[in-house]
Amino acid sequence: MLWNLPFITVVVLTLIGLVTVLLKKNIIKILLGINILNSAANLFLITLGYREGGVAPIFTLAPSELMVLPTPQALVLTSIVIGVATSALVLSFAIVLQKKYGTVDIDKIRRLHG
């Protein structure tokens, strides 16, 4: 049962992130949901690259069948950088919306706009 724990955690994090993105109206809360989804995707990639008893692929003389897959690790590093950039962009949008409309609630901004 513990072997499936990372996959169960991925499903739970994905559900929490989806519910937050779909049901919340505050831009900051939506950003938190997106970050939770990003964390779920990162955990999923790392879990797929895990090998029981594996060693790091850098600076070892171990046979290749004993090494952990390096590709998911590289993808997760790239995903972290993209997630930080996306978060910064959404936060800057939230600051501009707060200054212009006085709120970050999507429904109120739609009513004020049209």
Image (spheres, grey):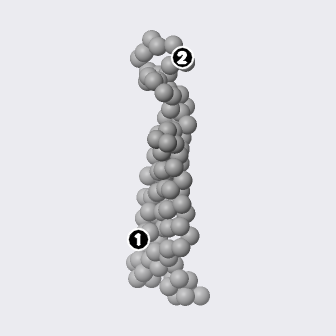
The three-letter amino acid code for the residue at tag 1 is: Ile
Residue 92 seen from this side: no
* Secondary element at image label 1: helix
Closer to us: 100 or 26: 26
- Which circle marks residue 74 in the picture? none
Which residue is located at x 46 percent, y 74 percent? 26
Which quarter of the figure has residue 48? top right
Residue 75 x %, y %? 53, 38
Q: Residue reaching furthest front? A: 1
* 18, above or below 107, in the image: above
* Circle nearer the N terminus (1, 2): 2
Which residue is located at x 40 percent, y 71 percent? 95
Apparent side of residue 98 relative to residue 19 in the rendered image (left or right): left
Closer to us: 98 or 70: 70
Query: How far separated are the C-alphas under marks 1 and 2?
Result: 49 Å
C-beta proximity under 8 Å, tags 1 and 2: no
The three-letter amino acid code for the residue at tag 2 is: Ser
Q: Which residue is mark 2?
A: 64
Residue 46 x %, y %? 50, 38
* Secondary element at image label 2: helix
Q: Which residue is mark 1?
A: 95
Which residue is located at x 43 percent, y 58 percent? 88
Residue 94 x %, y %? 44, 70
Which residue is located at x 50 percent, y 56 percent? 12
Apparent side of residue 84 relative to residue 49 in the rendered image (left or right): left
Q: Callout 1: few (<14), some (14-19), or many (20+) C-alpha neighbours within 10 Å? A: some
Image quarter where the C terminus lies is bottom right
Q: Give the foreground label among 1 and 2.
A: 2
